[in-house]
């Protein structure tokens, strides 16, 4: 007999796991013989497992216990052995609690502790803790505290872990493998990169960051990632939890290949993904990168400028990824000063195919600024023009080249007059490339005209 006190709850939970398998008979092996996951950007993963099944011909149910609590039950795809037919599927999870046990034993016989040395058999009449009513064998109605109720056994068909139950029919005893796959939620990955800038060469490292909140741990599983925006009917919102991080061996890189418009990464080793933990796996290392620095300022359309306006200069670094595909993620750029590593800035990148040049904005340049000053403005009914003085100030101790981008119109009636050379970039940006010596200010005037 079991007395349901606070001290016995953990023992009950452990015993119920054993009870589940004994009660139903036909239960899949507790651990899969093989397991693999494909994790998507959309906070979902596809689980594929092979498990052993022992089934007697009189068994009508197969229990798969301890499934992920976030399983999409309508996505379950099971391949049963020949001779076994599947009629229906249920998802069950009976959470163990005092209230649950009281409700199950309502109007049934229990053992009651009246004092340290006196126990009686009685019928449970109510199930509202903390006090319940029992009826003794002498037909006495006795109120007692719920912790003084002693249960004789566990209720039938009581399942204490998230479980799938398959109702089946079979004409023979068998021992065979079962293959199944299903979708789960709250398991996700994202990508992060570290770009370490050195004087002679730079290095880019890439990491898969896995966050498992699915309600299930995975042990010794094959793992793959599908980088790309897969279309799902419903995309649950990820939930943030406090976690711990682990690090996989960095010298065993995932194998990447294209597949149906996505990029598929498969790890060459098995992994453990505990529930409620984060794991980091290195998937990329690009050494000896050639890095270019750029200083860019995008100012206001000159036809709308009034008076003066100061603009900041953004610092960018750029490099080419060569033959490597880069899934979208966050790039953190680091440099070194006197042996101390310093974070220079962060930037997001989108899914980037091979042989692309990436431009990473890492922050405002402290020693550079651009001043726009309106010198002249002429507005007529069918024509508008303005003359702007641009001053690019470099307060640093070295010469720097500033890219000045001015939004303007690229059409037949639009005219730009300047002694400095310029080009149109990105469609409608009048772009100047301006070397500015240390501790100097470069000034020049540009006139803009356009028909209305």
Image (cartoon, grey):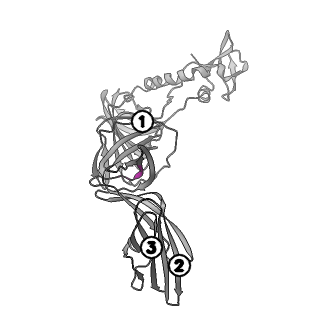
Please tell me whether residue 190 is drawn above or below residue 443 in the rendered image.
above
Residue 208 or 216: which is nearer the viewer? 208
Q: Which residue is mark 3?
A: 406
Please say whether residue 13 is one of the residues in the magenta stretch: no
Locate residue 179, reporting x and y percent.
Answer: 32, 37
Q: Residue at x 28, y 47 (%)?
A: 256
Residue 417, quarter of picture: bottom left
> Could you say which disc has been placed on residue 430 in the image?
none
Residue ID at (46%, 26%): 20
- Magenta part of the protein: which range? 326-334
The kind of secondary structure the magenta stretch mainly shows is: strand
Name which residue lies at 40% across and 25% down. Answer: 25
Gap between marks 1 and 2 measured at Cα: 57 Å
Does label 2 or label 3 sit earlier along the sequence?
2
Q: Nearer the viewer, mark 3 or mark 1?
A: 3
Asked if residue 76 shows in the view, the reply is no
Judging from the image, what secondary structure is the residue with disc 1 in? strand
> Few, some or many C-alpha atoms within 10 Å of disc 1 (few <14, some 14-19, many ≥20)?
few
The CA span between labels 2 and 3 is: 14 Å
The reply to whether discs 3 and 1 touch (Cβ–Cβ < 8 Å) is no
Residue 416 at what x, y percent from top left?
41, 81
Q: Can residue 69 be seen here?
A: yes
The residue lying furthest to the top in this view is: 117
Helix or strand or loop: what does disc 2 sit on?
A: strand
The residue that mark 1 highlights is 246
Quadrant where the N terminus sits is top right
| Magenta stretch contains residue 327 | yes
Tell me how far mark 3 sits from mark 1, CA to CA.
Answer: 47 Å
- Residue bearing the label numbered 2: 374
Residue 146 in the image: above or below residue 426: above
Q: How many numbered marks appear?
A: 3
């Amino acid at each position: 007999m079991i007395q349901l006190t606070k001290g016995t709850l953990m023992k009950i939970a452990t015993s119920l796991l054993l009870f589940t398998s004994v009660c139903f008979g036909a239960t899949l092996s507790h651990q899969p013989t093989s397991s693999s996951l494909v994790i998507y950007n959309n906070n979902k993963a596809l689980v594929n497992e092979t498990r052993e099944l022992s089934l007697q011909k009189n068994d009508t149910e197969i229990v798969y216990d301890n499934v992920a609590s976030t399983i999409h039950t309508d996505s379950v795809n099971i391949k049963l052995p020949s001779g076994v037919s599947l009629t229906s599927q249920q998802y069950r999870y009976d959470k163990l609690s005092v209230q649950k046990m009281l409700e199950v034993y309502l109007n049934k016989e229990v053992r009651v502790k009246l004092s340290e040395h006196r126990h009686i058999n009685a019928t449970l009449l109510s199930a509202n803790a903390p006090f319940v009513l029992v009826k003794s064998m002498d037909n006495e109605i006795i109120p007692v505290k719920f912790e003084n109720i002693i249960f004789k056994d566990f209720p039938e068909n009581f399942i204490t872990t998230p479980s799938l139950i398959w109702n089946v029919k079979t004409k023979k005893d068998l021992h065979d493998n079962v293959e199944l796959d299903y979708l789960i939620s709250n398991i996700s990955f994202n990508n992060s990169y570290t770009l370490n800038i050195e004087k002679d060469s730079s290095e880019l490292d890439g990491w898969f960051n896995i966050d498992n909140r699915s309600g299930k741990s995975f042990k010794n599983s094959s793992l793959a990632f599908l980088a790309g925006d897969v279309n799902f009917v419903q995309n649950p919102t990820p939930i943030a939890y406090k976690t711990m991080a682990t690090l996989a061996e960095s010298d065993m890189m995932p194998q990447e290949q294209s597949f149906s418009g996505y990029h598929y990464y498969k790890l060459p080793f098995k992994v453990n993904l505990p529930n409620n933990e984060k794991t980091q796996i290195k998937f990329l290392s690009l050494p000896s990168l050639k890095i270019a620095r750029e200083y860019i300022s995008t100012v206001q359309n000159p036809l709308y400028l009034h008076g003066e306006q100061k603009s900041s200069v953004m610092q960018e670094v750029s490099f080419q990824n060569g033959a490597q595909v880069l899934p979208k993620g966050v790039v953190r750029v680091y440099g070194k000063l006197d042996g101390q590593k310093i974070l220079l800035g962060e930037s997001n990148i989108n899914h980037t195919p091979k042989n692309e040049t990436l431009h990473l904005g890492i922050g405002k340049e402290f020693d550079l600024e651009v001043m726009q000053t309106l010198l002249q403005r002429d507005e007529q009914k069918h024509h508008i023009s303005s003359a702007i003085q641009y001053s690019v100030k470099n307060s640093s101790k070295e010469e720097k080249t500033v890219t000045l981008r001015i939004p303007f119109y690229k059409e037949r009636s639009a005219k730009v007059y300047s002694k400095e050379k310029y080009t149109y970039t990105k469609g409608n940006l009048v772009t100047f490339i301006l070397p500015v010596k240390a501790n100097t200010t470069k000034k020049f005037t540009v006139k803009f005209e356009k028909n209305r």
